[in-house]
Image: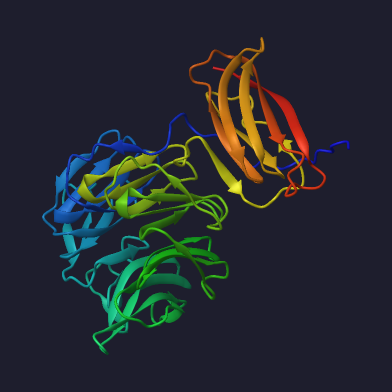
Amino acid sequence: MKVILLAIVCNVTLVLAQTGWILQNSGTSNNLRDVQFMNSSTGFISGDGGVFLVTTNGGINWTLQQTGLGNLTDVHFLSGTFGFVSGDAGISKSSNRGLDWNSVYFGNDGAFMHFVDQNTGYKITYTFSKTTNGGANWQQTFVFPPGGTTRLVYLNESNMYCTGWDWVMMFGGLYSAKIYRSENGGANWSVQYSSATDACCSYVKDINFQQTTDGFAVGHERTANYFYRSSNSGVNWSKTPIAIEMNSVYFASVTKGWLAGLNGVIYYTTNSGAQFISQSSGTSAQLNRIYMINEFTGWIVGNSGVILTTTNGGITGFSVITGEIPEDYSLCQNYPNPFNPMTKLKFQMPNSGFAELTVFDALGKEVKVLVNQQLSPGTYEVYFDGSDLPSGVYYYRLEVNTPRSDKSEHPSQKGNFTQTKKMVLIK
């Protein structure tokens, strides 16, 4: 039977030459709680014991400052010099990149906050309050049920979200994980998600939105851990069990996102959480907060002063894009092409088989084997790093050997498949 190959769309993007997540030197062993970057160079971190860290070179060097403000849970800067931190001692602001701090709210019910500009801001724990004069005065607008909140997310006046739990003093205490939404600037909050009420402990830990429609969250309900997803601004939420309790979720696009949590575990998805793959963090410390500035560059902070960074989304080797069974075999053209020094290759298999993806130079000499193993049906992507090779023309070849006797195979695609394409490395 003649094999007809169907074209596939290759939505891939250039990344820089780096492997996975890399540890950066924080200069402290204190637990780090929050991280924010203004761009690829300027970033801020807050942590326990009043620790505040600043970098202006992407984290190659961090300047450690002791603020004396108690444990800091949240950091939010509006520019490279002006911003806020919050925590046990309330909320403070700095106009000189953290060298000096002035209190704008004193009290332990301002642990999480967000400022729209230098005047308009919000704070939340068991109450929600707003300021319109930079924190000189605060107006309480809402009181949550007994329990607590774990994160505040501001998209606009009509889309504000917070996560947490509520608690009822009954039979030793009953808990329910919660996601709340406000559509009127925090004057009122409605419950968007509520878990079954049960014994300790249940809570939604973190929430992240792409645009105003696609929401993602992580949490824990009694003895199980969950990833939550909404595609209609949080009106409905689906939940998927995950193995590890996660503290933070961040999506750089509707499809690509990361989870980080206990034991140094990082999960990555390219299909909105339908599937997750583990990424190596190089640490067993608890990870507390993720911040990505795009699909490839970002940071994670955690306990014991851990700072991780990536410039390729944490991807190493090759990963499954989707487990859906494609119609035909196909090897996609690499992107970018020409490239320097990294490029991404993508291929799909309708059947299980032993796959080999190999790179050759212009003379036909084998340069690197990228894939050499048994694979299930699906679509895969792999990075090729040509940093140790000279400029020139290279070829990459996909060979798949599928046993003809395998009854599980796609009926139109049995036997062997081979395809070769050309790529150009320019330095």
Q: Give left or right: position of 341 versus 242.
A: right
Q: Residue at x 39, y 66 (%)?
A: 219
Quarter of the rendering containing residue 9: top right
Q: Is residue 134 visible?
A: no
Q: The N terminus appears in which quarter of the rendering?
A: top right
Residue 361 in the image: state x and y as whole percent. 63, 14
Q: How many marks?
A: 0
Residue that sits furthest to the top in the current view? 363
Q: Position of residue 85 (x, y in %)?
A: 24, 58
> Which residue appears farthest toward the right when viewing the image?
1
Residue 246 falls in image quadrant: bottom left
**76 or 426: nearer the eye?**
426
Q: Position of residue 138 (x, y in %)?
A: 25, 75
Q: Which quadrant of the rendered structure holds the C terminus?
A: top right
Identify the residue shown where x is 36% and y is 50%.
265
Pick the front one: 338 or 107:
338
- The answer to whether 254 appears left or right of 168 in the picture is right
Spot the residue most to the bottom: 170
Q: What colour scheme was applied to this rendering of the protein?
A: rainbow
